[in-house]
Image: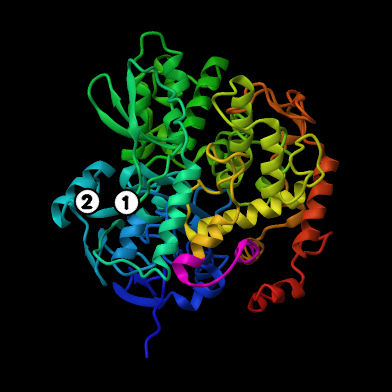
Amino acid sequence: MTTNIYGWCGKILKIDLSELRISELKTMDYADRFLGGRGIATRIYWEEVGPNVSAFDPENHLIFMTGPLGATGAQGASRFEVVGKSPMLMPEGFCYGNLGGFFGPFLKKAGYDGVVITGRSAKPVYLWIHDGAAQILDGSLLWGKGVYEVRDILKKSHGKNVRFVTTGVAGENMCRSANLMTDNEGSATGGFGAVLGSKNLKALAVLGTGSPLVAKPEELKELNKLTIHLNKRDPLMAPFPEEQVRRTGQSSCFQCGLDCKYRNAFRTASGKNVVRKCQSMFVYLPWVFGRPGESTETAVDATGICNDLSLCTMEMYNIVQWLDTCYKSGYLTDKQTGLDISKLGTREFFENLAKMIAHREGFGDILAEGLLRAGEKLGEEARAYFSNEVSGVGDGASYSAREYPMNGLLYALEPRQPIAMLHEVSWLTGLWVMNQADPKSSPVTSEVFRAAATKFWGSDKAWDLNTHEGKAMAATKIIDRTYVKDSLLLCDSVWPLMVSWNTPDHVGDPTLESRLFSAVTGIETDETGLSQYGERIFNLQRRVLLREGRRPKVDDVPEEFNFVAPVETVFMNPNVIVPGPGEEVISRKGQTLDRKVFEDMRKEFYELRGWDSESGSHKVETLERLGLSDLV
């Protein structure tokens, strides 16, 4: 007798490109402990990728994983996770990425919860997945093509509704910052495009007509209505002048009716219709704005150039900033770089730079190794011109611990910039900053800020960003919630729903995720029960990092600039203000993170986690409590 599986499809594809062999894993062998997405992918990584495997070795795995809420109609659940050993990290190591669009839900509609890829094909290939079947097909016609041309070829071959993950020329040439790209301009940093290229795998294409089962469809429908109501809000202002680039709406992902703060559709003055999202909109914007007479459309096109070549826009921003500083300081010349740096800010300059890197031409070959490795090759003088942003995979100063103390723990414990965790802090603070400037722009008064922080971060001391009290507890809450979110594959644009424009107290609801999970899967749990999954997955990742050589007391530390370089301004918070008692407004401008304060927070965090408070290592009883005794 077959028992229905609700939410999950029950199967994971496993592809060995060296042997051209296709097999399947059982999702439910993993889901009871690790949910999906980041949880299951990290567990498979633990089982399959040894600490001595290099990022470009055939033995490295690229693990694509959806979550149990995808393709069920659950709002904001259209994302998927990718896990593998990253060539962008220095040294190489475990990393993860998160993408939106349509690929993840369509993979589930095709009957699979994930795809695990290992080996290396002898020639270019792509993977075609459709309604319970998979084929490894000749990819020679796709090789050498940009992301947009690959999209068009796949649609011509497999129909207009086909969805895909691919990489551009930068990935084929194993540029260490090469992205994976998916439909609707979705991307993931970490250099996983280069890993795809190293395997001679150009793309994964998928088309499916099925749907996973939902345990309680009527309950899910009501929760979706509630989520849409609580989330309803005015759109954020676009960063472009209206007369040159006009916002025409938002470009929603699969089955999503939520107001999205990151994904926008634009129409340019020349008639282009494009989708631009989040940080990628800013990859070249400051230099275009600083170039008299240059059209804002150049900044819009710069994002498209990066996406088509599959270059990480965070890395490209840092590279342009570094070149600008080096040129103004007289350290680099046009002759050394092969670039006319006096044209920085023009479309011509950016296009030439991007192509040099993606094709590994001249000085671009050095930059294709990533800015950190370029600094190692060029020497100490080159590194002296790095900004604080240059400290790893997106790991920089944007939301540093100098202004938001608990962020020191979030940065210190992750292998890359933990952007979804940082958003939980910066978004709430940013809405408060907006309210201070114009009460009509945001409902987050100081009172709402304190109430939301207390409710979501676990104590009535967590809201005070001028003290370390309650910050270790806040970090545990934020981490566990994010790991669950990345395993259910809920979108960072909405989740967690900390604030609402449409309730009397304007405070969101931290129980919604567990209620959605129970409605879809039929597994009854609550906020605390769901958080325990997050705690388990976080501890699993910790074991992975320790196995790969992490030294807790040395590596569980944010970048040195947090302790020595006073903060001057912050994205969404230029004056670095935070709430004080009552209606008091306090500025943290000029502050650094106190080293002793951080060490005290870290020790408390270790204790809350059930780790040894001095060494940061796991206690056996903690792993056993979490059902991870096999990791001892």
Task: Identify the residue shown where x is 34% and y is 39%.
Answer: 251
- The secondary structure type at the circle numbered 2 is loop
Q: Quadrant of the N terminus?
A: bottom left
Task: Identify the residue shown where x is 70% and y is 73%.
Answer: 623
Task: Identify the residue shown where x is 50% and y is 70%.
Answer: 44
Q: Quadrant of the C terminus?
A: bottom right
Quarter of the image where one finds residue 74: bottom left
Residue 148 pos. (x, y %): 25, 42
Check contact, mark 1 vs mark 2: CB within 8 A: yes
Query: Which residue is nearer to you in this view: 19 or 262?
Result: 262
Density class for disc 1 (Cα within 10 Å; few <14, some 14-19, many ≥20) is many
Identified by mark 1, the residue type is Thr
Residue 187 pos. (x, y %): 40, 45
Q: Earlier in the sequence, mark 1 or mark 2?
A: 2
Density class for disc 2 (Cα within 10 Å; few <14, some 14-19, many ≥20) is many
Query: Which residue is nearer to you in this view: 520 or 321?
Result: 520
Residue 311 pos. (x, y %): 40, 40
360, above or below 551, in the image: above
- Was residue 531 drawn as part of the magenta stretch in this picture? yes
190, above or below 136, in the image: above
Q: Tell me the residue that label 2 is attached to.
A: 142
- Start-end of magenta stretch: 518-535
